[in-house]
Amino acid sequence: MSLVFTGVCSHAPGITGREERAPKDQRDALYGAYAEMRDALHAARPDAVIIIAAEHFANFFMNNMPAYAVGMAQSYQGPIEDPEWLRIPARTQPGNAELSKRLIAEMLQTVDVAYCEEWQFDHGIMVPLHFLDPESKLTVIPANINCQGPPLTPLHRAWAFGEAIRRAADSVPERIALVATGGISHWPATPDSGRINEEWDRTFLDKWLANDRDGMMDYTDADTYAEAGQGGFEIRTFIAAAAAAGGPGKLRFYAPIPIYAVGCTVAEMEIA
Amino acid sequence: MSLYSLSKLIYSLNRDPVAKAQFLSEPAKLADNFDLTAEERDAFVSHDVGKMYVLGVNGQILMHMAALCGIEWSDYLQRMRDGVKTHGPVREGIYAMTTGTDEKVAGA
């Protein structure tokens, strides 16, 4: 039918795995924002949810690294990490291989996506699902943008990927939702973990909320690395979501929470 | 090429239940399947997170491996700081340290 929902959220493993180590008011407000997003997502009655993630070498590695990949399986398993460490039990999420195939075929008209009949979810998808679909009811189609192993896809191609997702969603009779997940500035999984450039984040978020394509394109990887850390490369997922949705955004939550290692963000975007 | 091999070993370990089982019982045998330097092999077999961090292993796969080894979060961060103190700055990759070895940005 069409794209019926677009949202973005953080996926840092500390959000679940170190839940109690954040200030309680911040933790509660963040968890509340995820709950609001969950309600909005389910209210859109999606037949499937495309989750654009920036995974962390759970499926893709430097031996054969796609810039863009989309899942084409009947089901997916996760988390790949120790479930006790992530505090998310192992689960199987339904997929829809046939729907994936139709969506991918349309995306390929403009973007050379890889398809994957196997995919293990890491925290990048498991943390959002933990909040947005606690009972594993939704049909999920994972998508990935390589934000880990340079050289990385240019930002304007992430935008084109978002446009391709929108066109594909609009070309099928099913109701498709889109959730993009990534961090803004952060230095995850290093001793710098907890460093967050709030000013950089808010500048980027202002551009994202205004769906300012030119503003979002105005970053080089060198500048992002210097000012926003290697985690900042994940703005690609936000950019793809903005391209897909087309409308302005609505911020439900943003706060730097150092023990969670990221400026925690929950937002939605109007479909235009 | 060697950092690539060490990284690939950890990537394989993190996603493969058979490799995980072998890692717990015979880590050296698991390492033998990859073309590693002695330094890399020793660091891997002895769960030396600090050394592997300095060698340039991507933090994401190292974080997952540390979780597999049961290393708690603050301890994981401290092991990387200690690695830099002992062995010097991160030698390769995009996960270099930008803070001081006595700094604890998140209080952890």
Image (spheres, coloured by chain):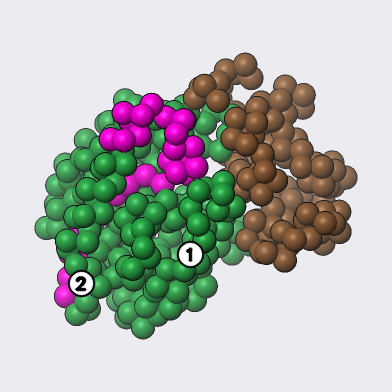
Chain colours: A green, B brown
Residue found 45% across the figure and 52% down from its top: A124
On whether disc 2 and disc 1 are found on a single subunit, the reply is yes
**Range shown magenta:** A1-29
Crowding around mark 2 (Cα neighbors within 10 Å: few <14, some 14 to 19, many 20+) is some
Q: Residue furthest toward the top? A: B102
Q: Element at badge 1?
A: strand
Residue found 33% across the figure and 59% down from its top: A133
Residue A110 appearing in the image: no
- Closer to the camera in the image, B66 or A100: B66
Distance between the alpha carbons at the discs numbered 2 and 1: 24 Å
Residue A92, horizontal then vertical, whole percent: 47, 68
Residue A265, horizontal then vertical, whole percent: 31, 40
- Kind of residue at disc 2: Arg
Q: Chain of mark 2?
A: A
Magenta-colored stretch includes residue A14: yes
Residue A89, horizontal then vertical, whole percent: 50, 57
Q: Which residue is mark 1?
A: A91
Q: Is residue A179 left or right of residue A247?
A: right
Count the numbered circles shown.
2
- Kind of residue at disc 1: Arg
Image mark for residue A175? 2
